[in-house]
Image (tube, rainbow, N blue to C red):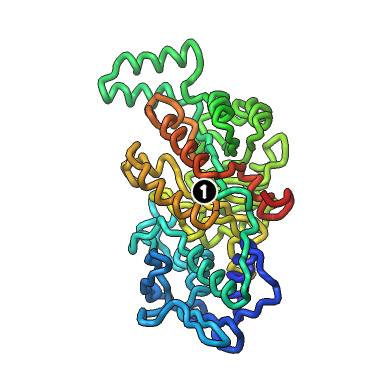
Amino acid sequence: MSYYSDYIIETFKSVYKIDPDINLNYGNSDSKISIQNKAFDYFNSEFINPPDIIWKEWFGTEIPFLFDNDNTLPIISYSENSVVINYDIIGSAFFFLGNWQELESTKRDSMGRYPFKESLQSQYNFAHLPVVNYYFDILKTVIEHVEGVTIERKLWKKSSFAVSVSHDIDKINSGWIEGSANSLKKGRIVKALKGVLLKVFKKDPWNNLNEILELENQLQVNSTFFFLTKKGNGNADYQFDEVSLYFKNIRDHNSEVALHASLNSYKDPEILEKEAGYFDKKTKGLRFHFLKYDPVLYSEVLDQTSLEYDSSSGFAEHIGFRNGYCFPFRPFNHTLKQASNFISIPLVIMDATLRSKNYMDLQLNSLHQISKITNEVENFGGLLTILWHNNYFSDFKFKGWSEFFINIINDLKSRGASFHTCEQICNIYKGNSGKI
């Protein structure tokens, strides 16, 4: 076995309950279960080119397998005494979970982020597929066949799947300006004037955190609120003491207060620790502002902090699975060649991704796209993480998006999903609060 196969098997075992004595061979045929190793030279080469890719069908779904150009073999070959997985599901899984395509690319967008268009998910149109979960399902199926057992999922076993709702609080003072300007552009003078009057005589329409809590109380869901500690220079439009007044009410609603790390904080663990220290109570996790982080520095920096989770791993430009995975996981630390100390809670769906003309530009006609994602998460009993900014609950500039959020939540509830804050997800994964 190799360092990366150990990591992938460890990640597999974090989700599925299997006998620790089961012998899996990667790269040879000396056990009852063997997995072909085609990726060793790839991960140990100084000169990296995009891997070969072929497509095979697994229970009705075409999925990609990397490091191979021969698609004539069956995915699994059964014999009397052994089973061979003919394609490198370990190397393929590590390519995505290990952020390999991002580490090897120097391309960045205008925000300094790895661009979605550079990814295999974009090039081959499979961002909606949690491909690592398919690889794990192949391995799970083989183990069940060989051992004559049924393998159970460890996480949220009483639910069809889990959902974590979150809100990045970027602006609470700009609704009257942006909303009124947007109304003027559309010739809605009365609505533009209303925004100004609200600001003068009441409060900004985007200063709506208590209203969001009331709505979620009616929907019987809780959520995580990510707050910036810095104002200006592309960060918050508020001072931290303006929002700290909401923390008690958020917690009283069984929701969570967490850090929205400022622009460029991803470079320095001391800055992240300082920003986390602004909060009145210890915060366990963060999400980077604009989802901006450097894949090269990501694990190494966060492993030097006391933060226990991050929920930034999603493409801003497209909904779906940046790491090809719909469960929490420990990212790979490439310096130490082992799993990180912190947990990644992948971000799957973001409102701005659906609406922005620079991203998917689906507006409110995106329920089909969301259902494709939800079906995949439900299929594997995974985790669906949703980001809905507070301003998207306001009719100022974002009319209809609050109702769209409600429709999504009601659909998820009808499917039997359970709802958890990011902190609760982290605790469940680590086993600190039992298994739900």
Kindly indicate the quadrant of the structure image that contains residue 124. Answer: bottom left
Residue 162, given in percent of the width and then of the height, sits at: 57, 48
Which residue is pictured at 51% across the width and 53% down the height? 313
Figure check: 85 above or below 101: below
Residue 261 in view in this figure: no
Q: Quadrant of the N terminus?
A: bottom right
Residue 43, given in percent of the width and then of the height, sits at: 50, 77
Which residue is pictured at 61% across the width and 53% down the height? 268
Q: Residues within 10 Å of mark 1 (few under 14, many from 20)?
A: many
Residue 197 in view in this figure: yes
In this view of the protein, which residue sits in the foreground, 19 or 211? 19
The residue type indicated by label 1 comes to Leu
In this view of the protein, which residue sits in the foreground, 42 or 28? 28
Figure check: 310 above or below 26: above
Which residue is pictured at 52% across the width and 86% down the height? 79
Figure check: 278 above or below 24: above
The answer to whether residue 348 is left or right of residue 427 is left
Figure check: 46 above or below 197: below
SS state under label 1: strand
Q: Mark 1 — residue?
A: 384
Q: How many marks?
A: 1
The answer to whether residue 93 is left or right of residue 57 is right
Residue 17, given in percent of the width and then of the height, sits at: 66, 64
Which residue is pictured at 37% across the width and 66% down the height? 62
Residue 91, given in percent of the width and then of the height, sits at: 50, 74
The answer to whether residue 327 is left or right of residue 193 is right
